[in-house]
Amino acid sequence: MGSKVRMMDEASVRHAYRRWAPVYDYTFGQVAEAGRKHAVSIINARKGSVLEVGVGTGLSLPCYGSHLTITGIDLSPEMLEKARARVDRAKLGNVAGLYEMDAGALTFADESFDTVVAMYVMTVVPYPERVMRELERVCAPGGEVVLVNHFSQDDGARGFLERKLAPFADLIGWRPVFEFDRVLVCDDLKLVERRSLKPFGLFTMLRFVKEPGAGVQPGVAAKALAGGKAGRVARD
């Protein structure tokens, strides 16, 4: 499997999303709507500051509660241009700023945000493990990191299709083959919830709480989460 997975570099990501920017809201933006709304509904029950990593064209921004202070980052200037226009049109006063930034090298100080969310990001970035550690770093103790992402299957028709698409990752702008363990690399992020999302369970929501030394080992988490559409994970 690994030999067929092509590494995506920053230039490939920028080029892919330069192409996607004009039509994103009407294509993948529609496919991803259910997952986006689910994640935002969870975050709206929280308080304080939120960092959205990979804010894209800002589709989620009008959905956040006005009691939250939102900061967004993205690597694509074309996407950010659309997000800023959306903020202006909707007069979203709770959006503190939208910045062009590499998710793997965030310029924010440690423990800056109460909630950090990355939706449909981990299969796009060149070094997802590095991004996970950055999400952990900027999240405040006791805060939450929320992911919405595609995780590949090893077998079945879907697994077959994902492997066939894998060599074209830099063209389509995301990795069809992406293993669950790649996001379980942070010592202080305790995985507390996993939920399969529409459409067809193609995407998964993961919710982590930042607790010192509470990280779940990849094999343990994979076993605990196998087979269920929704579940919670506790560490011994």
Image: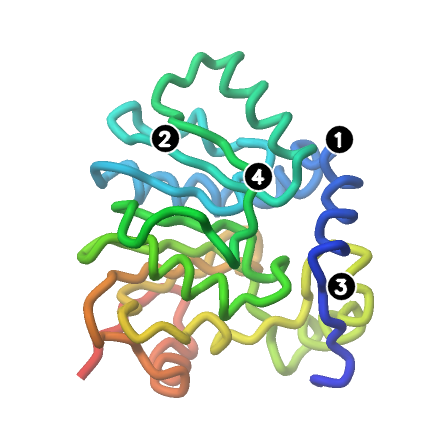
Residue at the spot 24% in from the left edge and 26% down from the top edge: 67
Residue 26 locus on image (x, y percent): 69, 32
Distance CA(mark 1)–CA(mark 2): 23 Å
Q: Which residue is mark 3?
A: 169
Residue 78 locus on image (x, y percent): 69, 33
Residue at the spot 63% in from the left edge and 26% down from the top edge: 82
Above-or-below relation of 178 to 58: below
Is mark 2 in CB contact (under 8 Å) with mark 4?
A: no
Distance CA(mark 1)–CA(mark 3): 20 Å
Above-or-below relation of 178 to 219: above
Q: Amino acid at mark 1?
A: Pro
Q: Which residue is mark 4?
A: 100
Residue at the spot 48% in from the left edge and 14% down from the top edge: 90
Q: Secondary structure at mark 4?
A: strand
Local crowd size for mark 3, using a 10 Å CA cut-off: few (<14), some (14–19), many (≥20): many
Q: Which residue is mark 2?
A: 64
Q: Amino acid at mark 3?
A: Ala
Q: Which residue is mark 1?
A: 22
Distance CA(mark 1)–CA(mark 4): 18 Å
Residue 188 locus on image (x, y percent): 27, 70
Distance CA(mark 3)–CA(mark 2): 31 Å
Looking at the image, is mark 1 or mark 4 earlier in the sequence? 1
